[in-house]
Amino acid sequence: ASIEQHGPHLPTGTDTIIGYALGQAVAKKMGNALVAPVIRPALSRHHIDFPGTITLRMKTFVKVLEEYCQSLRHHGFKNVVLFVSHGGNSDALNAFIPSIAKKVAPDIRLLVVYPLEKNVKSLQELLAERGITRQRAGVHAGFSETSVMLTLRPDLVAMDKARPGLIDEEFYQPENIERSKISSFIHGVKSQSENGVLGDPTGSSAELGKLIFERKVNDIVEEIKNNLTA
């Protein structure tokens, strides 16, 4: 997860709140799983220009992941699933999880669930059906994330402070999104959005947030069943 700014309308614990709620919902749906404490803080250097953000160095974050998995191995767990509720952690997981997996094998089977292309497309279609564009949905504190928070913790959402951030259509096009992400990491989010929002949270909907959340839960459960229960 992370401890980082999410615009003026969402708390710094947004990724943690969503990540833990996803874990609880997935475990309940699986029926035979436990939810470990959320790993936070993490990699948020690109948000450090905003107050409240706490970040780790890459090697610190990777070491935390390794020690975490080693601890779970010590306690006898056989299958461990990691999933991302903060996009800034994805590349590190992709790069270092194979080496961590080797260190805990064969005692633990380690699965990392990433947002698959088919699942991202599915969510985009869900939003498009309701007239929500990619740039409005956003990738950080925009319509999608704010809607999910309105479902989970409406008491922590200040919709009266919600304002559009970066809503440049070109930034969110599929062919540009990787380049846009790299730009965020190199130059910082503040260079792209003065209020730290990548998207437009105005008009966010708890009802739609529930649908988004449920879709994510189902996607994670599907990946676990396809990869760990065989």
Image (cartoon, grey):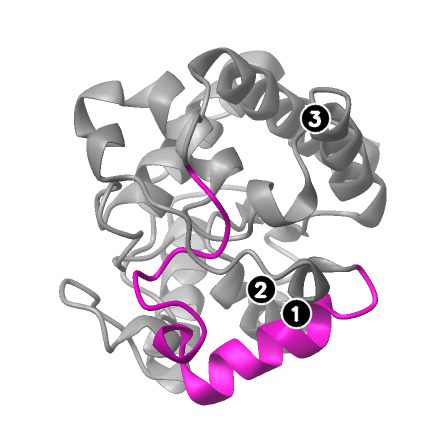
Vertical position of residue 98 compared to residue 226: above or below: below
Task: Give the distance between the C-alpha atoms of the residues marked 1 and 3, in whole angstroms.
Answer: 33 Å
Task: Give the distance between the C-alpha atoms of the residues marked 2 and 3, in whole angstroms.
Answer: 28 Å
Callout 1 touching callout 2 (CB < 8 Å) = yes
Q: Which residue is mark 3?
A: 131
Q: Residue at x 49, y 60 (%)?
A: 166
Label located before the other in sequence (2 or 3): 2
Residue 213 in magenta stretch: no
Q: Which residue is mark 2?
A: 90
Q: Is residue 176 visible?
A: yes
Magenta-tinted stretch: 174-201
Q: Residue at x 42, y 61 (%)?
A: 70
Disc nearest the viewer among 1 and 3? 3
Secondary structure beneath label 2 = helix
Disc nearest the viewer among 2 and 3? 3
Q: Crowding near pointer 2: few (<14 within 10 Å), some, many (20+)?
A: some
